Image: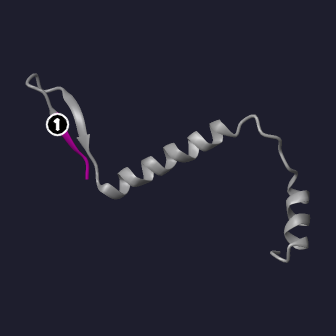
Amino acid sequence: MKQYLLNEKGRKTAVVIPIEEYRELIEDIHDLAVVAERREESVIPFSEVKKRLKADGLL
């Protein structure tokens, strides 16, 4: 359930959301920041990842 805080003119100025929803939003923001940071990194093909995991006994 969302609740809104209003100013003296009745306009919404803030919102109160459940803590779990807030945590999910923060996690999403963090994930997007990581993606942005790593945008320029080279890509490893999935087949190579599978090969490495098999060699390490993890797959």
Q: Amino acid at mark 1?
A: Leu
Q: Position of residue 30 (x, y in %)?
A: 52, 46
The count of marks equals 1
36 sits left or right of 18 in the view: right
Q: Which type of secondary structure does the marked residue at label 1 adopt?
A: strand
Q: How is the image coloured?
A: one colour
Image: magenta residue range: 1-5
22 sits left or right of 10 in the view: right
Above or below 9: residue 46:
below
Residue at 50%, 43% in the rendered image: 29
Q: Position of residue 34 (x, y in %)?
A: 61, 43
Q: Residues within 10 Å of mark 1 (few under 14, many from 20)?
A: few
Above or below 12: residue 22:
below
Residue at 10%, 22% in the rendered image: 9
Q: Position of residue 13 (x, y in %)?
A: 22, 30
Q: Position of residue 23 (x, y in %)?
A: 40, 54
Residue at 37%, 53% in the rendered image: 21
**Which residue is situated farthest in the top direction here?**
9
Name the magenta segment's main secondary structure: strand
Residue at 91%, 72% in the rendered image: 55
50 sits left or right of 36 in the view: right
Circle 1 sits on which residue? 5
Occupied quadrant, residue 52: bottom right
